[in-house]
Every structure is written in C-alpha cells, then in structure tokens.
Amino acid sequence: MKIPRKTSQEWETLEQDLYAAGVDLAEVEAGAHRLLAEARGHQLAETRIQHFLAEKDVAARMGVSIAHHAH
C-alpha cells in the first residue's frame, strides 16, 4: 500500500487538529519513531531469514551485540 504524500500545509492542519483534540504532539512523534523502529526490525529479521544468517552473525557484521532480555 502506497501512502500518498502530504503537503506541509496538510501536515500543519493535521497537527492543529491533533492539538485541538488534546493529543500531545511529542506522544505522536514518539509513536511514529516506535513504528519505524518496529518496521526496520521486521525488515532486518526478514532479510536475515532470507540469507540464512544467525542473529549473532548479523550483529557481528553490524558491530553490535545482541541484547539479552530476561523473561
């Protein structure tokens, strides 16, 4: 699905509408960043699977370590 580009005027109107509705714009921005991060993570996982790479191999190539989560 291709999202149509919005003009700066349309974005400004949207921001004003959100502000008028009591939405914190910093919250909207944080949500947008979170969605982008999730999308990038998903894309990285898909690429890793397609190339039969282990997570640790990808991390090593990127020069990062794998975060270990306590469950």
Image: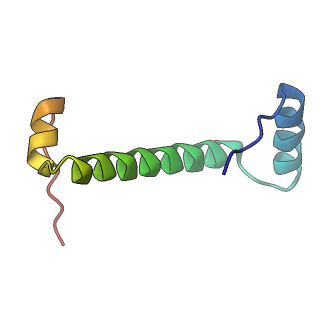
- The residue most toward the top is 8
In this orientation, which residue lies closer to the viewer: 48 or 24? Answer: 48
In this orientation, which residue lies closer to the viewer: 38 or 68? Answer: 38
Q: What residue sits 9% from the left and 35% below the top?
A: 60
Residue 54 position, x and y percent, is: 11, 51
Residue 62 position, x and y percent, is: 18, 31
Q: What residue sits 52% from the left and 50% below the top?
A: 35
41 left or right, relative to 4: left
67 left or right, relative to 37: left
Residue 71 position, x and y percent, is: 18, 73
Q: What residue sits 29% from the left and 46% below the top?
A: 47
In this orientation, which residue lies closer to the viewer: 68 or 27? Answer: 68
Q: What residue sits 76% from the left and 53% below the top?
A: 23
34 left or right, relative to 57: right
In this orientation, which residue lies closer to the viewer: 42 or 53? Answer: 53
Q: How many marks?
A: 0
**Which of the colour schemes (rainbow, by chain, secondary structure, one colour) is used?**
rainbow
Residue 3 position, x and y percent, is: 71, 44
> Quick check: 21 above or below 44?
below
> Quick check: 44 above or below 22?
above
1 left or right, relative to 40: right
